[in-house]
Amino acid sequence: AQTVTQSQPEMSVQEAETVTLSCTYDTSESDYYLFWYKQPPSRQMILVIRQEAYKQQNATENRFSVNFQKAAKSFSLKISDSQLGDAAMYFCAYRDMDSNYQLIWGAGTKLIIKP
Amino acid sequence: DTAVSQTPKYLVTQMGNDKSIKCEQNLGHDTMYWYKQDSKKFLKIMFSYNNKELIINETVPNRFSPKSPDKAHLNLHINSLELGDSAVYFCASSPYIGQEPTDTQYFGPGTRLTVL
């Protein structure tokens, strides 16, 4: 069965600095999708970035980028120029073509931004 | 414009009561979901409907019953509430595969249910 592991329960970073959140997953599939979601104190789950496994190029969305290492089954999120509004829980998620739209979620990483 | 909305946002009730949570999406998506997030923030899928048909039904007590009157709505009814049902419940929706390269899920704001 597919699993998603986020090994960092909590991370902190100084405002304007860069931080990397780690995510690893286990799958025997070759075609799948990976996502990072953000959950601020407002509780709403917000999509940050997504990556298709067949694309070698790492996805980028403004200050957010990923380091996708397919062979290592690693999908880390880099946040550049951290802002106070980035403080949230960050969840890594996986989906493959056969999972019937079911996302497999990591346990989350709490990101603290120090002013 | 709110894409996925849930009502109520907060629900406090006594053990044994029956309650419902409503969800609506205005994105034109075909698929909707219910998730439960426990106190440790772990997200677990409960149900998924595609075009009003149940496609995912994880192992949840049969006290939980989803109802989809149309593809824009997926309500969650809970009978005989128990203390362990206290959690945040999220509704989400996504387009049917083939309409987008990836089926990104759009989440509602969540409903915090507290059972006393």
Image (spheres, coloured by chain):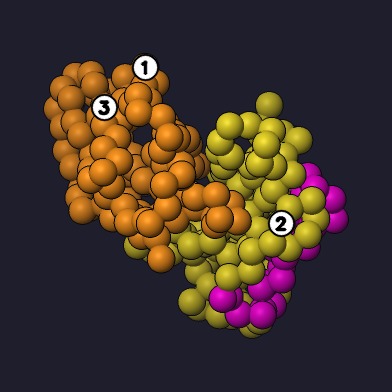
Chain colours: A orange, B yellow
**Dot 1: what SS?**
loop
The Cα atoms of the two marked residues, 3 and 2, are separated by: 34 Å
Q: Quadrant of residue A41?
A: top left
Q: Which residues are magenta?
A: B59-79
Per the image, the residue denoted by label 2 is: B49
**Dot 3: what SS?**
strand
Instruction: Return the x and y of residue B58 as percentages of the image width and height.
Output: 58, 70
Do the residues indicated by labels 1 and 2 lie within the same chain of the protein? no
Q: Is residue A103 magenta?
A: no
Q: Nearer the viewer, residue B13 or A34?
A: A34
User: Which residue is at 66% across, 58% downward?
Assistant: B48
User: Which residue is at 69% across, 62% downward?
Assistant: B55
The Cα atoms of the two marked residues, 1 and 2, are separated by: 33 Å
Residue ranking furthest to the right = B69
Write down the chain letter for disc 3: A
Q: Nearer the viewer, residue B109 or A30?
A: A30
Quadrant where the C terminus of chain A sits is top left
Relative vertical location of residue B15 with respect to residue A2 in this rendering, above or below:
below
- Tag 1: amino acid: Asn
**Dot 2: what SS?**
strand
Residue A77 appears left or right of B106: left
Q: Quadrant of residue A19?
A: top left
Per the image, the residue denoted by label 1 is: A62
